Image: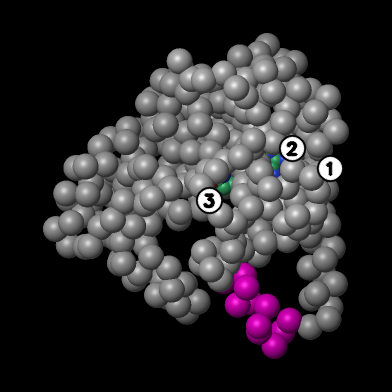
Amino acid sequence: GLSKLNGHLKPRYVRVNTLKMDVDSAVQELEKHYTVQRDETVPDLLVLPPGSDLHAHRLVANGRIFLQGKASSMVAAALQPEAGWEVLDACSAPGNKTIHLAALMQGQGKIIACELNEERVKRLEHTIKLSGASNIQVFHGDFLGLNPKDPSFAKVRAILLDPSCSGSGTITDRLDHLLPSHSADNMNYDSMRLHKLAVFQKKALAHALSFPQVERVVYSTCSIHQIENEDVVSSVLALASSLGFKLATPFPQWQRRGLPVFAGSEHLLRMDPVEDKEGFFIALFVKTNKLDNPKP
Ligand code: SAM
């Protein structure tokens, strides 16, 4: 079906779970059967030929590598959490980015993984178990219901917000639009759905910025729609600036930036569904007083 087509178009990306295996060893193992390259953007990401089927691979089964796309792997990397930090993953299931955070933090510090949907909490718990991470605390509930002033969040330094979105950047979604069933009624339904999603995305991003000790917030979607991307970011700019946040530039070497719809949108990162084979969006907010401090 469509996912097969997908597999032929895109290279197969695998992220090495550095909690269990180092990148060199993973390359050595995979090179026995595949042509393996290192991704130029994300250090723990490997690129294999399109169509490489690793679903049954031993390294996948034992959680040493995860089948995670490039865009998805750029999100936790954009947040740059430091080892020992407390980090909140606001919308976390199935947990691909949660366990990437854990790996980037070298298993140190603490991650709170929030997820609203009970079925998806189970998938999240499975992913965490497979990753071997021991510093992730799962919270089953509504991110918007978390009180930023609650003492349990007093030390949270970074938030990853990857909320529900239309998924319009994924090829399956785009091909759905070519089906004959895609009538005017569907289009109307789509625009209402987009509007509802955007309302939630705006609330969630404003909420993330309001945690008192947070100095880095990443907002990401796998959508190509301005209404879920640039418009969400621009809706919180005044609030962000009043709290001391500025837009920072994730992966400055990346060419494709936000749509030029407000001053500062050049900081945003976009991936194009055709050119980059995946539609995606990343925004990074950083507290201004932390912007110029070089890392120790
Ligand atoms: N970050 C995940 C990953 O990389 O594996 C994918 C997250 S998915 C795009 C969005 C998730 O947010 C869904 O699992 C959805 O159930 C959850 N969600 C939606 N509304 C939420 C809310 N109000 N609070 C917490 N989680 C929510």
User: Which dot, 3 or 2, sits closer to the camera?
Assistant: 3
Q: Earlier in the sequence, mark 2 or mark 1?
A: 2
Q: Residue 235, which numbered label?
A: 1
Q: Residue 205, which numbered label?
A: 2
Q: CA distance from mark 3 to mark 2?
A: 23 Å
Kindly state the secondary structure of the residue where label 2 is placed. Answer: helix
Q: Magenta span has 147?
A: no
> Are the residues flagged by discs 3 and 2 in contact, CB closer than 8 Å?
no
> Are the residues flagged by discs 2 and 1 in contact, CB closer than 8 Å?
yes
* Residue position for label 3: 254
Region rendered in magenta:
171-182
Image: 203 above or below 106: below
Report the amino acid beneath label 2.
Leu
The image quadrant that residue 141 belongs to is top right
Image: 269 above or below 224: above
Q: Earlier in the sequence, mark 3 or mark 1?
A: 1
Camera-nearest residue between 276 and 249: 249
Report the amino acid beneath label 3.
Trp
Q: Residue 134, which numbered label?
A: none
User: Which dot, 2 or 1, sits closer to the camera?
Assistant: 1
Picture residue at 18% right of the left edge, 56% below the top:
31
The image quadrant that residue 19 belongs to is top left
Is 128 on the left-hand or right-hand side of 255? Answer: left
